[in-house]
Image (cartoon, rainbow, N blue to C red):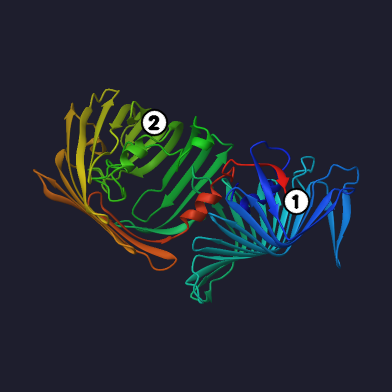
């Protein structure tokens, strides 16, 4: 079953409708009313569904199709109103699941197939949720359709008596796999409360980021400026994005895209609609050339992720990244079309991209430009403690530029100890023809990469050195992170391209993985209630 917080209702909804699994209920005392079709379970009640258990003091189940839709049920001095195909757990309610635990003082669910979707199908009061280090408390939670609406919510990943940080919300709306919205949001740092934020939206769709409010940003050499980007999903297959930024030393930047993905949501990956830039990082998925890539197996995994994206875009005054033109020139693409595909075939991972449009350097003339690129990678092969991989890249201009290149990268990684990795890679590229723009040229055509990774329980350190026979040691990169309770500060530096970042990572991967799951389930459903 799904983790109960996000799919409490289907736990009971499936009782009569599925033919896969059954729910078993145990209790010290069972009272059955055959006339009105309800059963009261008392004392040490335990309901078991696969890997999930519900433990409570009293459980009342009305699994009936009688003409009377609602019936008052008396249990001692307590009275409960239950309709057909409804259940209520009262007292000390606890749901125990491999993903985490839920506690509540009162839980009500309905699995009536005729119930309107506009009406609640589950409610919980006095809610306390624990998923790994994440804790959430809510006064009340109500399920409407696929959404959960919560009131007076507080969440943190710090279990200490004085949390490093916490978030409190008057209301929280969660639509798993799509989006979430918090209203009346208060952020507390070391007990000090920041000014309340009226509304805060966040994306739970792994394919695209959430729309952000305008924010102050800093760029080396350009100073402080303002940047904003918006992402607007249209159904499951389309995305419209807009990005605007303004810095004192640069002309305003504007980018707008319309993307269409041919991959179903169930098979989609992180940033599904994003295509690789033709003037961006030359090493976006290279373990030996990009410190962001943490494992030698990630290269083939990234290239082999299923993608089938068509994109139309318009951009003005954008800068290259990791190219000879960085910080020197800007580029504009009034109109451009891109088709990108990736996947696996015969054990190899591949990515191909075809783009065509108008291209302009600085204030120069806009000319037609076409480009075909492709990459193919072997999976990481293991031989004892040794891992190896190979990748080939190629690109060709399809316009008057007549410029093309071919090359690749190969390397090995050795693990002398479980938490240590030493790696070495070689790369080489050859160009043909004359490039029209600096952004087309390689920063380094051949060289050797050395990499070292040390993974402690709390501290992780990665280092890369790259050597080019014509430039010497032209690139150094490092990534250092330190787990500090609920947060993980990260420092990243890349000499080539010129990049330096300091960030703070909130350790909520397990929670986000559950929130991004639209189906919310493991695929098992009960066939019937078995006392």
What residue sits 85% from the left and 56% below the top?
A: 81
Q: Position of residue 325 (x, y in %)?
A: 25, 43
Q: Quadrant of residue 430?
A: top left
**Residue at the limit of the structure toward the front, as seen here:** 28
What residue sits 27% from the left and 26% below the top?
A: 396
**167 left or right of 11 in image:** left
Q: Position of residue 199 (x, y in %)?
A: 60, 59
Residue 343 numbered tag: 2
Q: Earlier in the sequence, mark 1 or mark 2?
A: 1
Q: Quadrant of residue 366?
A: top left
Q: Is residue 82 above or below residue 443?
A: below
- Relative to the observer, which residue lies in front, 197 or 327? 197
Q: Quadrant of residue 331?
A: top left
Q: Position of residue 344 (x, y in %)?
A: 37, 30
Identify the residue under disc 1: 120
**347 left or right of 513 in image:** left
């Amino acid at each position: 079953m799904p983790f109960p917080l996000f799919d409490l209702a289907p736990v009971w909804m499936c009782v009569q409708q599925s033919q896969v699994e059954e729910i078993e209920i145990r209790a010290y005392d069972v009272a059955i009313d055959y006339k009105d079709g309800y059963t009261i379970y008392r004392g040490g009640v335990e309901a078991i569904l696969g890997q999930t258990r519900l433990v409570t003091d009293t459980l009342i189940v009305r699994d009936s199709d009688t003409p009377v839709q609602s019936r008052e049920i008396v249990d001692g001095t307590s009275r409960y109103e239950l309709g057909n195909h409804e259940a209520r757990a009262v007292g000390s309610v606890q749901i125990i699941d491999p993903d985490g635990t839920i506690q509540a003082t009162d839980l009500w669910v309905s699995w009536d197939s005729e119930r309107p979707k506009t009406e609640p199908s589950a409610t919980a009061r006095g809610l306390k949720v624990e998923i790994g280090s994440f804790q959430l408390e809510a006064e009340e939670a109500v399920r409407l359709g696929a959404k959960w609406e919560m009131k007076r919510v507080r969440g943190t990943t710090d279990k200490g008596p004085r949390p490093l940080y916490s978030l409190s919300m008057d209301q929280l709306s969660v639509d798993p796999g799509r989006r979430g919205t918090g209203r009346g949001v208060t952020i507390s740092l070391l007990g000090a409360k920041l000014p309340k934020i009226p509304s805060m939206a966040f994306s739970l769709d792994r394919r695209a980021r959430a729309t952000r409010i305008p924010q102050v940003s800093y760029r080396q050499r350009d100073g402080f400026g303002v940047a904003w980007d918006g992402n607007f999903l249209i159904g499951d297959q389309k995305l419209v994005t807009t990005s605007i930024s303004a810095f004192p030393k640069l002309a305003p930047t504007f980018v707008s895209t319309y993307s269409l993905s041919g991959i179903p949501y169930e098979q989609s990956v992180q940033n599904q609609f994003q295509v690789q830039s033709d003037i961006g990082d030359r090493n976006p998925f290279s373990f030996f050339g990009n410190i962001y890539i943490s494992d030698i197996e990630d290269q083939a995994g990234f290239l082999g992720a299923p993608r089938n994206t068509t994109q139309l875009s318009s951009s003005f005054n954008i800068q290259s990244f990791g190219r000879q033109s960085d910080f020197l020139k800007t580029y504009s693409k009034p109109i451009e079309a891109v088709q990108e595909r990736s996947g696996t075939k015969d054990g190899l991972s591949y990515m191909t991209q075809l783009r065509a449009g108008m291209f302009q350097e600085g204030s120069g003339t806009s000319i037609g430009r076409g480009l075909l690129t492709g990459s193919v990678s072997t999976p990481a092969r293991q031989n004892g403690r040794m891992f190896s991989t190979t990748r080939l890249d190629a690109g060709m201009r399809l316009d008057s530029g007549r410029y093309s290149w071919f090359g690749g990268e190969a390397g090995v990684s050795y693990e002398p100890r479980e938490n240590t990795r030493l790696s070495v890679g070689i790369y080489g590229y050859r160009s043909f023809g004359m490039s029209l723009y600096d952004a087309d040229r390689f920063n380094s055509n051949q060289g050797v990469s050395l990499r070292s990774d040390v993974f402690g329980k709390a501290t992780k350190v990665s280092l890369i050195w790259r050597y080019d026979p014509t430039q010497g040691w032209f690139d150094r990169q490092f990534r250092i992170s330190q787990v500090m309770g609920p947060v993980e500060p990260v420092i990243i530096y890349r000499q080539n391209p010129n990049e330096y970042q300091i960030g703070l990572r909130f350790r909520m991967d397990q929670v986000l993985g559950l929130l991004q799951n639209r189906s919310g389930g493991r695929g098992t459903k009960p066939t019937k209630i078995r006392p």
